[in-house]
C-alpha cells in the first residue's frame, strides 16, 4: 500500500520535507515523487528565469531531480529546499558556461556596506512603468528581458529571493556565499532592473 504524506505540515516550504526525505531514502518512490510534484514548477521557473529559455529550463528541471534522486542517500539533514535549489542553480551555471553565456562579475565593492534593498514586487507601483496600463504578459516579457541582461550572479540572487521567495540565509546556502554578499548582489541587481525597465518604458 502506498503511504500518503501530508503536504501542509510544519515545514516552511509547505510540506513535511524531513519525513518525505527519510521515506525516500528508505526506497519509498512515492515520497520522492511528492517532493518532485511540489518543486518541479518552482525549479522550472528558476531555470527559465536564469537561462531565459524554456527548452533548456526543461532539461535542467529533469536533470535536477535525477541528480537529487541519485544523491539522496548522501543527503544528511539540512534543508532539502536549499539543496534542490543548489543543484538546479549549479546546473544553470554549468549550462551558461557551456554556451559561453556567463558574464564575469567584478567582485570590486561586492561586499560594501549594505544598500537599501528595494523589493522586486514594487515594480508595478513605480512611475518607471508606462502611464497606460501594461498587459501582464508585456510586463512579464519586460522583466525577463531585463533579468537576462543582468550579470548572472546578480540575476541568480534576484530570482532566488524575489521570485522564488527564499530567505537571504537560504539564498546564501544555495549560492554558497555570505549573506552580506547576497544582499549586496540583490541590491545592485534590483537597481539595475529598475534602471533597465525605466529605460525600456521610456522608449515606448
Image (cartoon, rainbow, N blue to C red):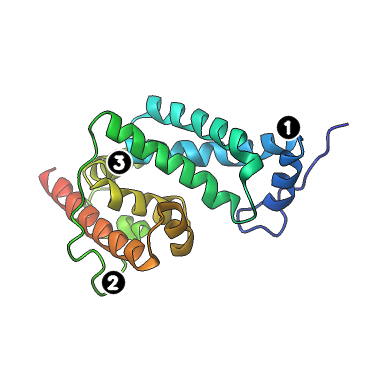
Q: Which element carries disc 3, helix, strand or loop?
A: helix
Q: CA distance from mark 2 to mark 3?
A: 23 Å
User: In terms of image quadrants, where is residue 107?
Assistant: bottom left
Q: Position of residue 12 (x, y in %)?
A: 61, 59
Earlier residue among tags 2 and 3: 2
Give the number of callouts: 3
Say which of marks 2 and 1 sits in front.
1
| Residue 35 appears left or right of 200 | right
Check whether the beta carbons of the residues at disc 2 and disc 3 lie within 8 A of each other: no
Give yes or no for contact between labels 3 and 1 (Cβ–Cβ under 8 Å): no
User: Residue at label 1?
Assistant: 29
Return the disc, 2 or 1, that comes first in the chain's sequence.
1
Relative vertical location of residue 57 with respect to residue 21 in this rendering, above or below: above
Which image quarter is the C terminus in?
A: top left
Q: Residues within 10 Å of mark 2 (few under 14, many from 20)?
A: few
Q: Is residue 83 above or below residue 119?
A: above
Reply above or below: 88 against 174: above
What residue is rendered at 29% in x and 29% in y? Answer: 98
Crowding at label 1, few (<14), some or many (≥20) Cα neighbours within 10 Å?
Answer: some
The residue that label 2 is drawn on is 116
Q: Secondary structure at mark 2?
A: loop
Q: In the drawing, what numbered circle is on residue 85?
A: none
Tell whether 122 sits left or right of 30: left
Q: Residue at x 34, y 41 (%)?
A: 50
The correct choice, above or below, for 143 with respect to 62 in the image is below
Specify the label residue 144 is tagged with.
3
Query: Percent x, y for residue 58?
Result: 45, 27
Q: Residue at x 37, y 57 (%)?
A: 121
Amino acid at each position: 500500500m502506498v503511504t500518503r504524506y501530508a503536504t501542509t505540515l510544519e515545514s516552511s516550504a509547505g510540506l513535511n520535507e524531513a519525513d518525505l526525505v527519510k521515506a525516500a531514502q528508505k526506497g519509498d518512490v512515492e515520497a520522492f515523487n511528492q517532493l518532485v510534484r511540489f518543486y518541479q514548477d518552482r525549479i522550472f521557473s528558476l531555470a527559465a528565469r536564469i537561462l531565459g529559455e524554456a527548452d533548456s529550463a526543461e532539461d535542467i528541471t529533469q536533470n535536477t531531480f535525477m541528480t537529487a534522486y541519485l544523491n539522496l542517500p548522501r543527503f544528511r539533514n539540512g534543508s532539502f529546499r536549499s539543496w534542490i535549489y543548489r543543484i538546479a542553480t549549479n546546473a544553470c551555471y554549468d549550462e551558461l558556461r557551456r554556451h559561453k553565456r556567463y558574464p564575469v562579475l567584478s567582485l570590486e565593492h561586492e561586499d560594501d556596506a549594505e544598500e537599501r534593498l528595494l523589493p522586486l514586487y514594487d515594480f508595478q507601483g513605480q512611475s518607471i512603468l508606462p502611464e497606460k496600463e501594461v498587459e501582464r504578459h508585456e510586463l512579464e516579457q519586460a522583466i525577463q528581458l531585463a533579468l537576462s541582461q543582468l550579470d548572472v550572479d546578480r540575476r541568480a540572487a534576484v530570482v532566488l529571493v524575489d521570485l522564488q521567495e527564499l530567505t537571504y540565509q537560504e539564498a546564501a546556502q544555495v549560492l554558497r556565499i555570505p549573506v552580506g554578499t547576497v544582499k549586496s548582489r540583490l541590491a545592485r541587481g534590483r537597481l539595475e532592473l529598475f534602471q533597465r525597465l525605466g529605460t525600456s518604458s521610456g522608449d515606448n
